[in-house]
Amino acid sequence: MEQAVALICRRWCIEEWLCVLKIGCKMLEHQHRDAATLLWAIALDAVIAWRNMLLGLMGRAVPGLPAALVFDAGECAVLALLAGSKKSRWVKP
């Protein structure tokens, strides 16, 4: 029984990852002309979907987790700029 529950949990994670690939990465909308380019795009999407899913799981488990634990300094700088630009659109001076 425990093994069946473990397998169901794994299946749920795989299905969630596939959903991120299809919806978040829009994998089904790729319009590449050759197989090599399509394979490269799918491989990149797979990594992006995995990281996106990991961030979501970590955010639910530990909501106040610092971004520096997951992103490098350059990525954190870009995120800070994006967060600042989004705030500036909504905050009145």
Image (cartoon, helix red, strand yellow):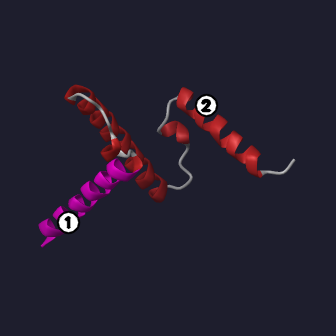
Compared with 35, 21 (above or below) is below
Q: Nearer the viewer, residue 36 or 65?
A: 36
- Name above or below for residue 59 compared with residue 77: below
Residue toward you, 72 or 38: 38
The residue to which callout 1 is attached is 8
Q: Which residue is identified by label 2?
A: 77
Residue 51: percent from the left, percent from the top?
Answer: 39, 42
Place of residue 39 in the rendered image (x, y in percent of width and height, measured from the top left): 23, 32
In the image, the segment drawn in magenta is 1-23
Q: Main secondary structure of the magenta part?
A: helix
Residue drawn 33% across the image and 50% down it: 22
Q: Residue at x 57, y 34 (%)?
A: 76
Q: Is residue 53 left or right of residue 65?
A: left
Q: Residue at x 25, y 55 (%)?
A: 14
Residue type at mark 1?
Ile
Q: Are marks 2 and 1 in contact (CB under 8 Å)?
A: no
